[in-house]
Image (cartoon, grey):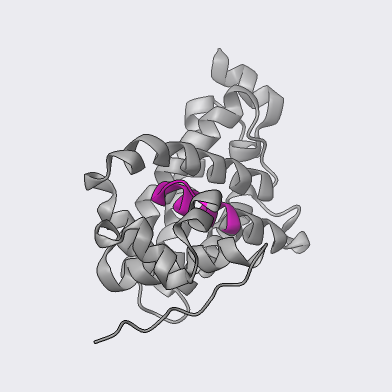
Amino acid sequence: MARKAAPKAGKGAEMPATIIESALTLAASRGWARVGLGDIAEAAGVSLAEMRAHFPSKHAIVAAYAADIDRAMLAARDPEMEGRPAHERLFDVFMKRFDLLNAHKEGVGAILRSCPADPEAILCGPLTLRRSMRWMLEAAGLSSAGLGGRLRVKALCALYLSMLPVWLRDDSEDMARTMAVLDRRLKRLDALTRSLCRLTPRRGWSGGAQAEVEAEA
């Protein structure tokens, strides 16, 4: 049987988005480990040369998708959250991210499940993760700079990784389970941060320069 020709992808700025969309769709249907670069190019309706011009590897596609999520999450910042406690601002940012990821939940899940068997993901994934967590901190009005910022980034990476399985298993329309677990873990992390940094009750995640001094002591 003759293979049906894939529709031609849009040129210019539209092409990377078409390639990412095709990659996530194939990941959901086949599993990420079984998807090759040629498969993605064919599904996107682009040549291998065009594919290579935008993405030299599958990991580059995942990194670009993560960057797209970062930008959309930052664009969706709620100015009314300013002045709210730090854990509430982080909760809002986390849920905005999960809401954006919902559009490709099956594809994201397939990519995550392939990570233990993917050396490239193991080597390059942490860099992409830390970059995204820095932007999430900044979106929540928390600095990612200095010693305090590095500690916040590490804590947020651990929290995000612990929340991904919860989000993947949550089949409710309003993500009620994800919200409940995230709220508990953020409050627990906030309390732990206060304790470790010997902060006053009003400082916690948003301790600023004084928090960094106390953490270094």
Farthest-out residue, bottom: 1
Q: Position of residue 185 (x, y in %)?
A: 42, 52
46 versus 194 height, above or below: below
Give the position of the N terminus as an image quadrant.
bottom left
Residue occupying image coordinates x 49% and y 42%:
128
Question: Between 136 and 57, which is closer to the camera in this rendering?
Answer: 57
Give the position of the C terminus as an image quadrant.
top right
49 versus 21 height, above or below: above
The image quarter in which residue 171 lies: bottom left
Q: Which residues are magenta?
A: 55-68
**Residue 165 in sight from this viewpoint:** no
Farthest-out residue, top: 217
135 sits left or right of 162 in the view: right
Question: Between 42 and 186, which is closer to the camera in this rendering?
Answer: 42
Q: Position of residue 189 (x, y in %)?
A: 46, 43
Question: Between 117 and 88, which is closer to the camera in this rendering?
Answer: 117
